[in-house]
Amino acid sequence: MRAYEVAHRRWGKDDIALHWTATAAHQRIGTYWHMLPEAAQARKAIWEAINPHTGKARIDEAFPMETRQTTRGNEMFIKFKCGSTWQVVGSDNYNSLVGAPPVGLVLSEWALADPNAWTYLQPILEENGGWAVFITTPRGRNHAATFYEACKSEESWFVERSTAKDTDVFSQEQLDRVKREYIANYGDDGEARFRQEYLCSFDAGVVGAYYAKEMQAAEDDGRISGVPYDPAAQVHTAWDLGIGDSTAIWFFQTVGRELHLIDYIERSGVGLDHYAKLLKERPYVYGDHILPHDAEAKELGSGKSRVETLEALGIKSRIAPRLSVDDGIQASRALLSRCWIDQTKCKRGIDALRQYRREWDDKLKIFKSRPLHDWASHGSDAFRYLAVGLEEKSPARAKKRRPGRSSASAWMGA
């Protein structure tokens, strides 16, 4: 069974999914997971959440105490007397979860989750005949939107979109008031946030997204399409090197003033030799490999920097200049206006650029000065290094360089 419910706020998505799981766990003995984008978020939204209508804990309503054998709060884990287990987990560490594989899976807030979680878990459910339920409110035209369109055409899927006008949760008077409050609280973003949260609009931009206008312009101009590799031009790469995190690599070619993003890879849990192998397997003739400035730091274990490790693997890299994140984002915005992006090979990178956003302070009702660090950070950071690397290499920028900047000198081959 596969189901995808796109619904407005306060529709009861998680509550329905919890009760569905409670029934399923007693019909088939197995492991069940309720996944949110981050484990910390899962604890607050599910494990410790209280139903405001009843005053009872959500998990106690779904899983009565008399059905349980064991409850472990530190692990957000329940074992039922029937033998099944249920656990709240984060999709941000999907590939490090241990124990028996799930036979039932709820992916909550799917629009904010790492889409690779489903890529990793789908084969498990296919093999064991398990089910999956996706529940979300839209967050722009990202992977959740394309997933929705694809699933609608599958006869084996139940797919539904429930807006606040399709249900009786809120009156029209309430919706009008909520809309006014959103505009008062969030200014220009208020209208988009209301359409997103209550009318389930995939076309309302991700609130706080850094590159919303630039990515929409690229789509409107037809610059997100098929972008073939040109064998006559060198392929350059830009990397974000994760430590215990994902590593992301953009592959690009410069054609006149255009920048062609022709390929993208992202992996986690593997060494630099794995990425060197992936590069060598591709038919590209390489030029520059742009790395972040911290790649020059020596690792305690090997005594070598990652620059040196890559060079030993046959990849001679250059270091992007050290600029503030804000300056890098501005450079990225300017660069996106002349980018052509391959919609197939770069799909995850495209989703990352669309989802990359400022962190929201819900207490102060303002955006923080820093980006939210989530799965979208890796591809977006790699693109930022690409942008500042190209900007540093431009003739206009080169004239402005101050003497003594070793990273810039290295980048220019001085």
Image (tube, rainbow, N blue to C red):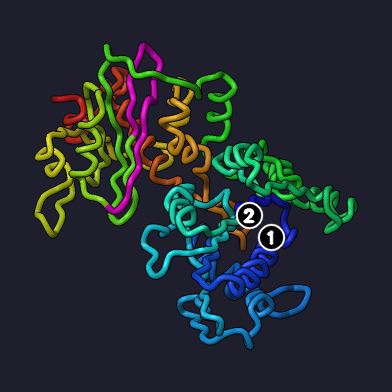
Q: Is residue 404 magenta?
A: no
Q: Residue at x 80, y 50 (%)?
A: 164
What x and y, as percent, mark residue 362?
61, 59
Query: Could you give the CA–CA distance between mark 2 and mark 1, rounded to whole angstroms?
Result: 6 Å
What x and y, as percent, mark residue 79?
51, 80
Question: Which quarter of the picture shows residue 26?
Answer: bottom right
Q: Can residue 186 be seen?
A: no
Q: Residue at x 51, y 80 (%)?
A: 83
Please state which of residues 351 and 161 is positioned toward the viewer in this rendering.
161
Q: Are marks 2 and 1 in contact (CB under 8 Å)?
A: yes
Secondary element under disc 1, as helix, strand or loop, is helix
Q: Which residue is mark 2?
A: 135
Q: Name the kind of residue labelled 2 in the image.
A: Ile
Is residue 331 depicted above or below 39 in this figure?
Answer: above
State the mark number for residue 79.
none
State the mark number for residue 13.
1
Question: Which quarter of the picture shows residue 376?
Answer: top left
Magenta-tinted stretch: 250-269
Residue 249 as seen in the image, left or right of residue 357: left
Is residue 55 depicted above or below 361 in this figure?
Answer: below
